Structure formats: structure tokens, C-alpha cells
Amino acid sequence: MIRFTAIRLVEIVAMLVMMSFVIYALIGLMPGDPIDLMLGADPHLSAADVARLKTLYGVDRPLVERYLAWAQAALSGNLGYSRLFSAPVVATLLPRLGNSLVLLGSSFVVAFAASLALGIAAARRPRSRLDTAVNFACFAGVSLPTFWLALILILVFAQGLGWLPAGGMGGGEGGGMADRLRHLVLPVATLTIASIGGYTRYVRAAMRDALGQDHIRTARAKGASEARVLWHHALRGAMVPIATILALSFGSLVSGALVTEEMFAYPGMGKLIFDAVMGNDYNLALAALLLATAVTMLANLAADLAYAWLDPRVSYR
Amino acid sequence: MKLPLVLLAAIAGLSLAGPLLAYVMGADPSSVDLLDRFAGPSAAHPLGTDELGRDMLLRLLEGGSVSLTIGIAAALAAAAVGTGVGLAAGYLGGWTDRVVMRFADGVIALPLLPLLIVLAALDLNKIGVPHALADSPAISLVRIVVLAVLVGWTTAARLVRGATLVTRSRDFVRAAQSLGARVPHILWWHILPNVMGPLVVATTLSVGDIILLESVLSFLGLGVQPPLASWGSMLSSAEELITSSPLLAIYPGAMIFLTVIACNLLGDALLQRFDPRGAIR
């Protein structure tokens, strides 16, 4: 188990190193490089100045050399300076990561709880009216464009009814916790509705599988109550595939969060990445993308470990 | 199976008939009429006009043909790439298989949308795409198809690899091998037909996903570029006007929703027919 974790961690680090190079190279290919931006801001710069600036920033050196210099600085904790926020990248990044984890975490908990209830209810009576309704609702959920859903929610609950704020994070100017929660409702609802359909389908499929096993019949024959059969015997077996799928869906959750944060002007990682890419903030975009990748891979590792913990037959030696 | 098929056929048929309808109505989807902006439904404009006075119905139909073309083209391309990779990995086995499948796992685990945004924002001139091509209006369509293939090939690759692993040791493959059949012949005539069912299902399901991806990229301003209409880009310009004219945002979103749910329901119906035990999802 320890060995498995260690190997996976090494793999993750190797993957991150690879990704950092790929992203570094890609970001250099985006339109408008820093020198062009300076040239645009100050028309008095001469060709000689441009050449001098290029040497100063090292833009004239080959890609690999520049990457190595960046990597060396990054390893000593210096990720550079954000052009967009006029602050060090690390100081910009960390609070945003916290905000995103609050959003992702709350919507994950809500979506998971709801999908367990719906999925189990649907799996107990296959082809019943409830099952059909849940199935159709799931299809509707996965087919909704997230940004459109967000627009509709804003239109109804913020513009129409005026119950909730349309965007931002709140909590400032003495608003406190209640204000922050009010600002969280619509983004969490959006992200939850967007992910619940997929989750419920997985839960239903896993529970159908689990309920068809021999040991369930044995438990029923022993006279175990329906609740015990469901929650103790069946759910335990079903949790194994469910846990894997849920953790693997973390990547798509991060993607959904990007759109949701952008729609609700919620200051999280997703919005940060989008703004950094669109605003040609190379340092920030690079660090933010790598952080998002690292978080996703760690979530996948957690899934593998949960898998072994839930299912005693699985052992990673 | 019938309902989603009818729905999809209706959307596709109407979208294809868009130019004909435009001819009959004597207008085209990009003709601007600043004196007739935000008009309500009328005989001349059945769904009203948008913020530039363009006919909403014609724009929706043009968006439909753009979205469906991208969705189907990209789904087929991703399935083709994935099939090639899956066949190679499954048939060759060993190191090729391990490396390729680890790579596919890695791609699946990435936070894809943030990375796609970087890829969608790339300056094509810097990668060495010729100017004439990089600035042509069709390039935004090609770009989305390429991005969708980069994301989507893994599903087909896994399916095909799995089936190839099972099939390659079956007796009829051994027989073909011993008769001296070449590898491409075996792959094409003996292995591929055995994965066709699940592959068709997965491809159908991916059309919906790709239309969603296209709409979100277009919404963010990175997909289909104006003057060409796409449901996502229509939503993007409608977003600022959501309070004054919400219908401009509701129509294209509803079209995306209907198209994607039709693809998903059709895929599910095919799944139950081809693969009742549900090995795909």
C-alpha cells in the first residue's frame, strides 16, 4: 500500500513536470508576447530597445533554456509576478484556490448526497415510474449547457425574484458569513445540477449490480430488514465503483467550475485561469493551470486509495 | 428510440433547410437592420429579431447547421483516431499497449476545459499555419474539431483496445493468421466488425458532448467566430442583454439542450439494443 502510494506520487510528479513543459511551450504560442505589449504601450521604443528588452527578459534564448530557468526559479518558490494583478503569483493563487475548493466541495457534497438518494430509489424499483422519471431527469441534467443554466438561474432568482445576488463572493463590508452563503447558493446550485445527472446514473448502475449479487439474496433469506440489506449489504459493494467514478469526475468538476465561476464572477481558480489566459498573463496562467492539474491528479490518487480501503479484495502490493 | 430520432431529424432537417427558408423569406441570417432591433414575433420575423435586427429564426437555423456539422465531424474524427490507437494498442500489446493506455488515462484525468482554453487561444501564425489559412473564416470550425478530437479519442481507444484484446485470441483470428492473412486484413475484417456496435453507441453519445464543448468555447469567445452564427456565440452576445430581452438567450440555449438531450437519448437507446449488459457506461 505504501509502495503503491509512493509509486503513484512519483508518477504524478513526473506527469506534472511533463505538463509544466507542455503548458510552458503552449503559453509562448499565445497571441501577443510581453515585448509586443510594452511596444504597444510606449511607441517611443526603438528597435534597439526591443532587442535589449528581449535579452533582458531572455525571450531570444531557446525554449528549453528558458523553461529550465523558469523551473529552477519555480522550485525555489518563485513563480514570478502577475502582470494582471500586479502581485506575486503565489499570493494571487492561494486565496483563489481556497475559494474554488469551497465552491467545489459544497456542490460535491450536495450532488453526492442527492445522487445517492435518487440513484438508490431508482435502483430499488427498476422500470418503475420513479425510475423512468429519475432516468429522464439525469439525461436532462447532463444535456444542459452549464453557462445557460447559470444565465437562467440569474434571470429567475436574481433579476426576477430578487432573492439572491447575481454574482460576486460577498462577505465584505461587514456582510459576514450569511452574506457569503447567500452568494454561494446560485453557483453551488448550478454546479450541482450540472453534475448530479451523471452521478445518479453511476449510483443507479452500481446499486443495480450490487442488488443482483448472491449475498444480497442470502441476507434477505436470513431475514435482514430491507433497510439493512440496502444500506449495509448492497451499498457497501456499490460504493467501490461509485467512489472511483466520483473521484475521476473531479477533472470535469474543475471544468464546470471554470464556467460557473466565470458566469457568477466568483473569484476562484477557474475564473483566474480564464482571465489569465485571455489577459496574456503568462506567469499566472502557467502556475494556475499546473495547480489545477496537480489538484485533479491528487484527487485521482485519493480515489485509488479509497478503492483499496473500501474493497478488501483489492490490494496494491 | 423514435422520439430522439424524430427530434434530431427535425433539428437537422430544419437547419439544412435554413438557406431555402431564407431565400423564401427574402432575408439572410446576417443581414443587419438597425431600424428593426429587438422586434417581437411578426409575419416577417417569426421569432423576432436580435440586437442588430437580424432574423432570430434564420440565425438559430444557421447556428444549428454549424453546431451539428462540428458535432458529427468531430465525433467521427475522434472515433477514427481512437479506433486506430485502440487497434494498435490491443493488437500489438506489450509496451505499445502500456504506454498508449497510460497516456489515455493521463488525458482523461486532466482538467480539460482550462487546457482547451489555452489551446483555443493559441496564435496559429506562431505554430506555422500559413496566414491565408489561419485568417480564413472556416479555421474556427477546424480548430474546434481538432480540439474535440484531442479530448475525445480516449473513449473509442479504450473500447476498441478492450475488444481487440478479447478478439485477437479467438479461433477465427487464429485461423486467419495461420492462413497467412496480413495484419491490416485481420484488423479490418475480423476485429473491427466485433467492436462496431459499442463504437457506434459511444460515437453517438459523443456528438452531444462535442456540441456542448463547442457551445461553451463559442460562448467564451474562443469557438465559432462572427459573422458565422453558432448557438454558443449567440448566447454570448445575448448575455449582456439578458435583463431587457431574455428571449435572445433562451432560444439558443433551448436549442443546445434539445439537440444534446436527443443525442444522449438516441445513444442510450442504441446502447440498450447493441449492448444490453451496458459495458460502455
Image (cartoon, helix red, strand yellow):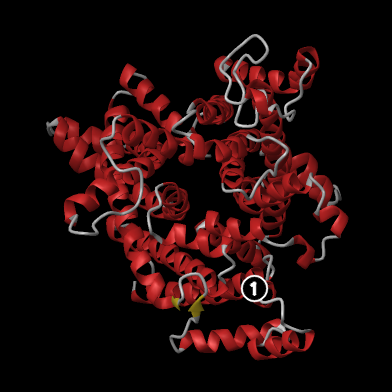
Mark 1 crowd level (few <14, some 14–19, many ≥20, 10 Å Cα) = few
Q: Nearer the viewer, residue B100 or B211?
A: B211
Instruction: State whether residue B216 is above or below residue A305.
Output: above
Instruction: State whether residue A114 is above or below residue A245.
Output: above
Residue A33, given in percent of the width and then of the height, sits at 67, 73
Query: Residue B6, located in which quarter of the rendered image?
Result: top right
Q: Chain of mark 1?
A: A
Residue A180, given in percent of the width and then of the height, sits at 24, 53
Q: Which residue is mark 1?
A: A41
- Residue A152 in the figure: left or right of residue B219: left
Residue A239, given in percent of the width and then of the height, sits at 30, 47
Instruction: State whether residue A300 is above or below residue B195.
Output: below
Q: Residue at x 39, y 33 (%)?
A: A155
- Residue B31 in the figure: left or right of residue B90: right
Q: Which secondary structure, mark 1?
A: helix
Amino acid at pointer 1? Ala
Q: Residue at x 19, y 55 (%)?
A: A175
- Residue B35 in the figure: left or right of residue B184: left
Instruction: State whether residue B169 is above or below residue B6.
Output: below
Q: Nearer the viewer, residue B145 or B263?
A: B145
Judge whether residue B110 can be spotted in this image: no
For the N terminus of chain B, the quadrant is top right
Residue A148, given in percent of the width and then of the height, sits at 48, 36
Q: Residue at x 32, y 30 (%)?
A: A123
Judge whether residue A229 can be spotted in this image: yes
Give the total number of marks visible in the rendering: 1
Query: Residue A30, located in which quarter of the rendered image?
Result: bottom right
